[in-house]
Amino acid sequence: MATTRTELELATNVLLHLNIIAAEETPSTSDSNYVIKRYRDLFEEMSVNDETYWSVNDVPAAIVEPLTQMVALLIMPAFGKPVDPQTMDEGLRILRRRLRRTTNVRSAETDTRFEDF
């Protein structure tokens, strides 16, 4: 089983999540390209904020679900699915927290400073 997913696999997962396509369908090129573009924009923003540790086209399987939900929130209006801006902001904040959990792993070899009171 693959440990990473491609941009196209992520785009397909997003479109399935929103019921734009059925499980047996292949997304149109224009739909896939739109989702991939929005994912790349999100990836770039997250990279600036040091929230990424993967390459843009090698999405770790562990984060596919929260990333799918994030991209889905961003593209919903473009596919005629209304979303409240406050709901979107709250959803993105929660999903970013889920993504950060996969990056907050400390090495056992890291020195930890402490003060004895």
Image (cartoon, rainbow, N blue to C red):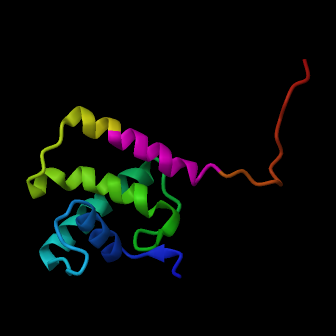
Q: As drawn, which residue projects farthest toward the left?
A: 80
Q: Quadrant of the C terminus?
A: top right
Q: Quadrant of residue 26?
A: bottom left
At 19% across and 77% down in the image, what residue appears?
27
Q: Is residue 102 magenta?
A: yes
Q: Residue at x 26, y 40 (%)?
A: 88
Q: Nearer the viewer, residue 13 or 31?
A: 13
Image coordinates for residue 89, horizontal then vertical, percent: 30, 37
Residue 82 on image: x %, y %? 12, 45
Span colored in magenta? 91-104
Q: Look at the picture and state if 92 lies above or below 68.
A: above
| In magenta segment, residue 100 | yes
Task: Judge whether 24 appears above or below 102 on screen.
Answer: below
Above-or-below relation of 11 to 100: below
Magenta stretch: helix, strand or loop mostly:
helix
Give how far across and how far down residue 94 sits, in percent.
Answer: 42, 40
Q: Is residue 117 left or right of residue 11?
A: right
Query: Residue visible at 25% across and 67% down?
Result: 16
Residue 10 horizontal/vertical position (percent): 34, 69
